[in-house]
Amino acid sequence: MDLIAPTEFAFMEAMLAELLQHCNDMEEGQLLQLHARLQAIYAAQSKLHASRNRLMALQSQTRR
């Protein structure tokens, strides 16, 4: 499972921040939606990681 690394996330946020100053009103709204989606993906992947760890722990318990 390939996840967004913290450095990649920070880089993408910095790119969006740089683009913001060049946006008209409509583009700004779209850019903000894109940022919200990026944040949601980043947050969801940590939940996926926690879920995987939980399932792996359960799996190791059943093997005993």
Image (spheres, grey):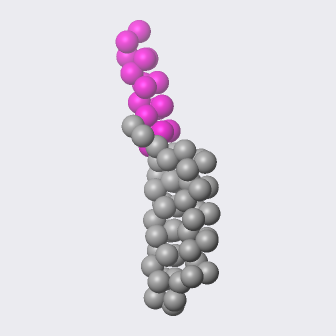
Of 19 and 25, which appears nearest the observer? 19
Q: How many marks?
A: 0
Q: Is residue 39 above or below residue 7?
A: below
Give the quadrant of the C terminus: top left
Q: Is residue 1 above or below residue 33?
A: above
Residue 59 sits inside the magenta stretch: yes
Residue 47, visible in the rendered structure: no
Q: Locate residue 61, reporting x and y percent.
A: 43, 17
Q: Residue at x 62, y 63 (%)?
A: 14
Q: Residue at x 41, y 30 (%)?
A: 55
Of 36 and 57, which appears nearest the observer? 36
Q: Locate residue 20, reporting x and y percent.
A: 58, 78
Of 12 and 34, which appears nearest the observer? 12
Q: Residue at x 46, y 32 (%)?
A: 54
Q: Main secondary structure of the magenta part?
A: helix
Residue 58, visible in the rendered structure: yes
Q: Locate residue 5, reporting x and y percent.
A: 54, 44
Of 27 and 42, which appears nearest the observer? 27
Give the quadrant of the N terminus: top left
Query: Which stretch did the figure color magenta?
Result: 47-64
Q: Is residue 54 above or below residue 33?
A: above
Q: Farthest residue toward the front?
A: 22
Q: Locate residue 49, reporting x and y percent.
A: 48, 39
Q: Farthest residue toward the bottom?
A: 25
